[in-house]
Image (cartoon, rainbow, N blue to C red):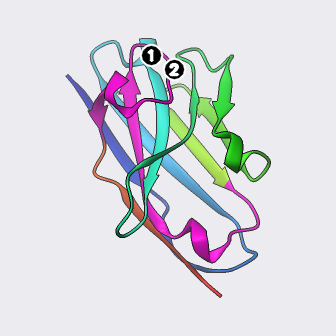
Amino acid sequence: QVHLVESGGGLVQAGGSLRLSCAASGHAISTYAIGWFRQAPGTEREFVGGISWNGDVTFYADSLLGRFTISRNSATIYLQIETLKPEDTAVYYCAAGTGLDYDENQYRYWGQGTQVTVSS
């Protein structure tokens, strides 16, 4: 069993930055890839980016390249977001899976999400 807890969300002004954290715990957590997803009201959940189990590989959704950076320090995974825009407003989730993938169905464990709201 793997347990994920996101934190760091909040209300920020457009142009600001934010760092979200995902605290991971559980059996063999260091062997899991972690993906970040987000879901805005009325939309489907979308892939933001992911990081491999050892932190050596990261990749991001093409539409989000440049403003999002994922890093990993042992069992804590970070999502740094720069130059926030109102359209970044969403609930952000981290998820654990056996391999990096864009497809949310490949991730077995999910956190409860953290709300990010960007004001214009």
Q: Position of residue 9 (x, y in %)?
A: 48, 65
Q: Residue 100 got which mark?
A: 2
Q: Vertically, is 54 above or below 9?
A: above
What separation in Å lies between label 1 and label 2 (alpha carbons)? 14 Å
Q: Image check: 67 left or right of 7?
A: right
Q: Nearer the viewer, mark 1 or mark 2?
A: 2
* Kind of element beneath mark 2: loop
* Kind of element beneath mark 1: helix
Q: Image check: 109 left or right of 63?
A: left
Q: Quadrant of the C terminus?
A: bottom right
Q: Which residues are magenta?
A: 81-110
Q: Residue 30 got which mark?
A: 1
The stretch drawn in magenta includes residue 87 = yes
Q: Nearer the viewer, residue 26 or 96?
A: 96
Q: How many numbered callouts?
A: 2
Q: Vertically, is 7 above or below 85?
A: above
Residue, x 72% and y 73% (percent of image)? 16
Q: Position of residue 25 (x, y in %)?
A: 32, 29
Judge whether residue 3 can be spotted in this image: yes
Q: Residues within 10 Å of mark 2 (few under 14, many from 20)?
A: many
Q: Residues within 10 Å of mark 1 (few under 14, many from 20)?
A: some
Q: Image check: 7 left or right of 28?
A: right
Q: Position of residue 1 (x, y in %)?
A: 19, 22
Q: Vertically, is 9 above or below 51?
A: below
Residue, x 34% and y 12% (percent of image)? 28
Residue type, mark 1 in image:
Ser
